[in-house]
Amino acid sequence: MRFLRSHVFAMQVQFEDIDAGGYVHHPRYLLFAERARYAALQEIDFGFERQLRENQTFVVAETMSRYVKPLSMGQRIWVVTRTVACRKSSIKVFQAIYTSEPSTNELETLGDAVFAYADLAFSLQIRFVFLNLSGPRVIEIPSESRAMLEIPGEEFFCASPERRDVRLLQWAS
């Protein structure tokens, strides 16, 4: 979950993911997104196990999701995860599930607009807060964690103040 970089996680819909109608049961979309976020954090050695050892972690504070089209058993899907904004103690992450693989070039060219890419099946916005598990209480994201997530310094946010806005956006109709 490197800041302003897209992480792609491929998977296939399994039998246990579908409901009696043969389509993915709606809460499973959130599980797909969770697996992709975990993989993105593991890739930079910032997985949940490490966070627990350090007695601090990101927790979900708010979500907003949109189901666009159904998924069915055996279907290949790609989950794109992108951290798009950051404040002292929180980050905003966009995630999307696609039925075709977006190319690396498309991901970099489109930036945040990748979440309007063709073949979108599901999109999700999440605001996470960083929590000290001893309290538990919300704390500032430590500098070491910010470095692992490649969150830029203050000068970047002065030049791009919109990247501080961790409020979830209303969906366009």
Image: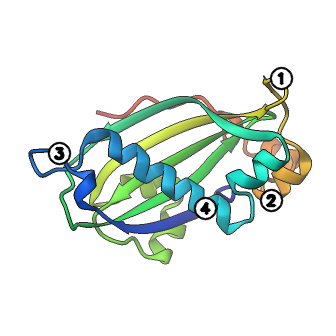
How far apart, in angstroms, are the residues tagged by discs 4 and 2? 12 Å
Residue drawn 65% across and 35% down? 59
Of 74 and 168, which appears nearest the observer? 74
The reply to whether the C-beta atoms of the residues labelled 3 and 2 are less than 8 Å apart is: no
Q: Earlier in the sequence, mark 4 or mark 2?
A: 4
Sequence-earlier tag: 1 or 4: 4
What's the residue type where badge 2 is placed? Met
Q: Residues within 10 Å of mark 4 (few under 14, many from 20)?
A: many
Query: Where is residue 144 shown, x and y percent of the image?
Result: 89, 53
Q: Amino acid at mark 4?
A: Ala
Of marks 3 and 4, the one in the foreground: 3
- Nearer the observer: mark 3 or 2; the answer is 3
Residue to which mark 1 is pinned: 135
C-alpha distance separating marks 1 and 2: 24 Å
C-alpha span from label 3 to label 2? 38 Å
Residue wearing tag 2: 148
Viewport quadrant of the N terminus: bottom right
User: In percent of the image, x 35 and y 34: which residue is there?
Assistant: 172
- Per the image, the residue denoted by label 4 is 40
Picture residue at 90% right of the left edge, 48% below the top: 143
Q: Are marks 1 and 4 in contact (CB under 8 Å)?
A: no
- The percent coordinates of residue 15 (x first, y second) are 22, 59
Judged by depth in the image, the label closer to the viewer, 1 or 4, is: 1
* Sequence order check, earlier mark of 3 and 4: 3
Q: Give the number of the disc on residue 19.
A: 3
Q: Earlier in the sequence, mark 3 or mark 2?
A: 3
Q: Is residue 106 left or right of residue 83?
A: left
- 93 left or right of 10? right
Total label count? Answer: 4
Amino acid type at mark 1? Gly
Neighbour class for label 3 at 10 Å: few (<14), some, many (≥20)? few
